[in-house]
Image: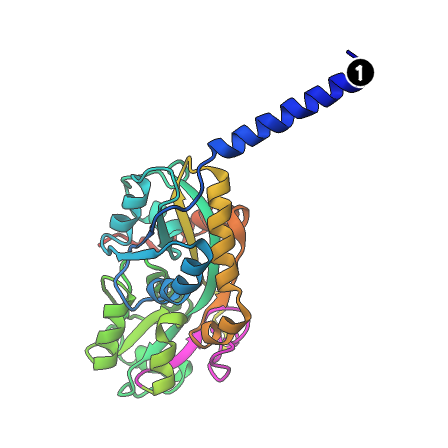
Amino acid sequence: MTSISRRALLGTMGAAALAGTAAAQPAFPTRSIRVVIPFGPGGGTDNLIRILEPFVTRALGQQLVIENRPGAASVVGTEIAARAEPDGYTLVALDSSFVINPGLLPTLPYDPARDFAPITILAYAPVVLLAHPSVPAATLPQLIALAKARPGTLAYASGGNGAPTHLVGEMLKTEAGIDLTHLPYRGTGPAMNDLIAGHVPLGVNGLSASAAHIASGRVRALAVTGDTRADAFPDVPTFKELGLPGVDLYTHWGLLTRAGTPQPVIDRLATAFNEAVLRPDLKQRLNDLGFVPAGAGAARYAETIARETARFTAVIRAANIRPD
């Protein structure tokens, strides 16, 4: 056999092997995909996924089934994904609670580094300090003056002990030298409901879960985190420009699935969700809700998880924050 014939034979065998491998790799997806949201309805995570759902469903050709499973600072819903089959049919959509909980909770029923495969970062958003209209403070400096005149009498609602919103509240107390009472809720939705009703005077919430209520005048926005003002509310100053640079935290939202899920499946999911969140026709809608679309991919999400876990663990220990 000539060398040319041998090369032709080897090429044919290689092509057949690749075809066999491709045939052995099952198509994905062939059935509906469950997206677990470990928070109640009406929060930033729930809002974001429900906006993206019809576009991702169309791209994948299978229905996204959204399942709200709140509890234990997002641990209940997150554990569901940690125990799922590594096939890409169970996802968990999370905010920054995923990187906060390792420093907050003494034990977790899963290993954040070992049990999950990052898919993508979907979006970022600042955190906003809110006041009920009955509070006699139209600006953050006025609120600080009020809190100093009445120490310990003003309370703020957050999405729960150790939530990003709680951490911003503690940063504000430290930076401004004021005494506020923390009222933790089981999610940002219930916290916002009580703030709107006037049952609590102040709230710290994600801008994405607050935007509609700010626009309607049901709550008053006093300051946002970040280096620049939010596009959706250019009249609301940042903590930094008001002289409180230490009040600095952005919420991020990402998707994870069970570790061991085949990489082609992760790539398919990442492509579908990234294309949805970066759609030009959704940009204004997401911006109006306070989201900054990211579509950053698995590698970026893995880096963010490692960096932010270390950062928040240091903040939690410094503030001596304890779980509920």
Residue 165: horizontal and vertical position, in percent?
35, 64
Residue 303 is situated, as x and y percent measured from the top left of the image, at 52, 47
272 and 113: which is toward the camera: 272
**What stretch of residues is rendered in magenta?**
218-241
Residue at horizontal 29%, vertical 53%? 74
Residue found at the very far left of the displayed protein: 199
At x 28% / y 42%, what residue is drawn? 106
Rendered-image quadrant of the C terminus = bottom left
- Residue 228 lies in the magenta-colored region: yes
The answer to if 276 sits in the magenta stretch is no
Which residue is tagged 1? 3
Q: Main secondary structure of the magenta part?
A: loop
In-image side of 2 versus 75 (left or right): right
- Compared to 204, does 98 lie above or below? above
Q: Quadrant of residue 141?
A: bottom left
**Relative vertical location of residue 224 with respect to residue 55 in this rendering, above or below:** below
Q: Quadrant of residue 50?
A: bottom left
Where disc 1 sits, the SS reads helix
* Viewer-nearest residue: 19 or 255: 19
Name the amino acid type tagged 1.
Ser
User: What percent of the width, then of the height, locates residue 274?
Assistant: 51, 58
323 sits to left or right of 284: left
* Classed neighbour count for the residue bearing mark 1: other residues with Cα under 10 Å, few (<14), some (14–19), many (≥20): few
